Amino acid sequence: MKPVQFVLLSIFCLFLPHTLPAQDDFYNVEKVQEISLFFGYSNWDYRLDTAKAGKENYILADYCMINGVRYDSVGVKYKGNSSYNAGRIKNPLHIKLDFVKNQDYQNYESIKLGNNFSDPSAIREVISYQILSQYMDCSVANFARVYINGSLMGLYTNVETVNKKFCSEHFGSSDHVFVKGNPDRPGNNSTSNLKFNTYDSSKYLIYYGMENTVGWYKLIALMDSLRIKTSNIPKIVDVDRSLWMHAFNNVMSNYDSYTGSFSQNYYLYEDDYGRFLPVIWDLNMSFGGFPGSGGSVDKLSILYQSTNADRPLISSLLSNATYKRMYLAHLKTIAEENFTGNGFETNAKYLQSIVDTLVKNDPNSLTSYTQFQSSLTAAISSGGGPGSGSPGLLTLQAARLAYYKTTPEYNYIPPVIGNYTADIQNRFVGDSIWVSVKLSNQNNAFVGYRKNKFSPFVYQTLYDDGLHQDGIAGDSIYGTYIIAQTRKTQFYIYAENNSIGLFSPRRAEFEYHTLEVNEKLTDIQKGDVVINEFMSSNQSTVLDTTDDKYEDWIELYNNTNQTVDLSKLFLTDDDSNMEKFEFPSGISIPSKGRLIVWCDEDSQTPNGVHANFKLSASGEKLIFTRQDGLVIDSVSFGAIPTDQSMERCPDGTGLFKITSKPTFNLPNCGIVANEDVKHLSPLYIAPNPAHHYFEIVNPDDIPIREIKIYNQLGQTVASTVGNKVDVSNWQAGIYFIVIVDSSLKSYNLKLIKE
């Protein structure tokens, strides 16, 4: 996967409200964040404890400072189960920047801070997420120095929240079923283990957090499928991602997880294809820091929980022979890539060097500096965890790898997968592409391929029969074909024998090979269609009638004299993901016309164009590109006041400026809007708001040539020359009226239909 290079065309806007913080470094592991909370009262700890003991609501802090940037009126609460203690001053924190105001820091609205409970090394969580990020989507993490009311609380771990923003960035949507496996009161009889008990959703309320009621029947359907081990399982859960999760938990001795006694600390998100995608959460007690294994943590079975009916997401999958071989392949990949050689030790010592002084000077540390200094090499206690001592990271992983090497499963000889070849020359999107590869020590193999990172893989069996572009039969060259659905088709190769499997690349399905074919480019050049106006903090200006919310929005403008098809063009706010949002097929923008893109993380909404990201209220960048990476337009911006927009003046070609009178889907540069219309225009609407009809009031008898009325999606809902318009059958919302007089001068008005 090669990074796409691009040139940022636009310059930073002038006259911004406050300095834009350095972008994309909030989770940079080399930068310790500084976070300060300020409460207007001294008993903040008592209030936080009280809220935690109740419904775990947020309390209001006067403001929060993040690396020198101030955020007023933020929500704060204590979080955690075993890591929280009302008698402790240093508890885990959850800060909600947008608790009252629409504000964020580098596009992050939610901040979660761990107190390094059960972790004398202070790096368990950070290094665990670093390892996990090689194999599945997960949070990023680093360190933070935290103050409250001017007093140093100490060193915390700063971990990215798994929320709608996370789902949108990693899974391409955020509005589907979202489940948290975290029982209200964890215990051996209270677990989120996905075991089916009943079709009555009320019986599961204490075990799972659920964003919406419709999700319960889908979660129960998953549990039912796992119970009866149907062939439907791959359609309802991402099998490969689940296998990576189980392998990671085993290698990392992470038992405060689905694998462990409480079966918790994971999320399930339903993707656009109806599959639940697991996400691991809360890794502060990895490396044997949790006493949930029931035995010596370094010698726990490589197939732990594989026959336990109370862990159906493990036992149901590993009862399938192919899935079991895939699991062993994944486990071996994690162990070999991370714990052979000196790389793990080098990285662990480097991370500790970042926080050494902070640990030494932490006034509220839960462990001593002496324990920190020996935390990589401490001895292994049976079971590990609180009360018995967390094992040293290096000690445990050396012992774990030594144990693995004594097991038959780890010593199985995998297949061999050679280099592949593919006939991509002069191939276009839609063509069949033949793939061939040399294999040995296998009795089954296939190719998995897909059109993009959010879609499921489709599988094609590999053959050595001389009929699939594989040479002659029996020559160990195997072949099959795949369909190039997009310009860059993602694929991997899998082979297995009776004991174990092997992937190419080894980190598949998370990583993959790419076949790039030709594609007819959209007939669009730099500047043909531009970002014309946008609003990054919309609280009361324009309502998105598809969900009756005030959402961020972008207005595009077509500078050309012809309609432009936007299908397969891309819009992004992340220069590391240039294809973040792809315009759906059939979306076009008329000559000299406008198109609204709602930035609301609701990309599957059928009405209008909805991107899978939101705009940062504190500023970021927008990039509009063609399939080949050509930047059609881009802009970087800082903070824009709430309910104000950034607009070009004049339309399509002018420089950007902040305006307090947004012109959503209307001409920029001085358009009259809202309640000022009646006083500043010779024409106005009455009544406004309207229920049944409205009239164009024309006191100067201006000769009117045409009246056009548009909805918020830019669609024409009426065209007339009469002054009176019947709106009784229109949906409630905001409409925009463009009136053209006989001299072709236009007047722009705004109507509210109730």
Image (cartoon, rainbow, N blue to C red):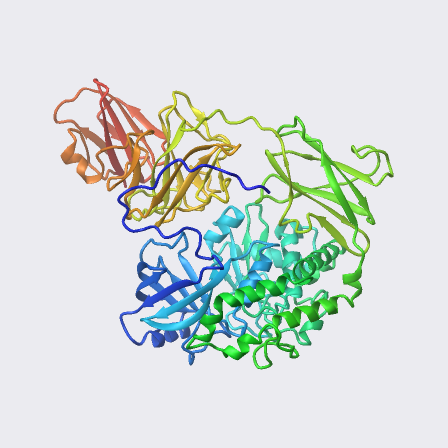
**Location of the N terminus (image quadrant):** top right
Seen as rendered, the residue at the extreme right is: 474
Relative to 260, say whether 573 is above or below. above
Q: Is residue 426 visible?
A: yes
Relative to 54, say whether 517 is above or below. above
Where is residue 155 drawn, in percent x and y?
A: 44, 70
Relative to 685, say whether 172 is above or below. below
User: Residue shown at 62%/45% (left/top)?
Assistant: 456
User: Residue shown at 46%/75% (left/top)?
Assistant: 360
Instruction: Compare residues 143 and 445 and report the one nearer the observer.
Output: 143
Where is residue 569 drawn, in percent x and y?
A: 49, 33
User: Residue shown at 36%/32% (left/top)?
Assistant: 714
Relative to 526, say whether 362 is above or below. below
Side (left or right) of 746 relative to 471: left
Q: Is residue 197 visible?
A: no
Where is residue 199 drawn, in percent x and y?
A: 58, 60
Side (left or right) of 426 relative to 88: right
Seen as rendered, the residue at the extreme top is: 742
**Location of the C terminus (image quadrant):** top left
Side (left or right) of 360 relative to 419: left
- Quadrant of the rendered image containing residue 389: bottom right
Side (left or right) of 673 relative to 403: left
- Quadrant of the rendered image containing residue 69: bottom left
- Quadrant of the rendered image containing residue 429: top right
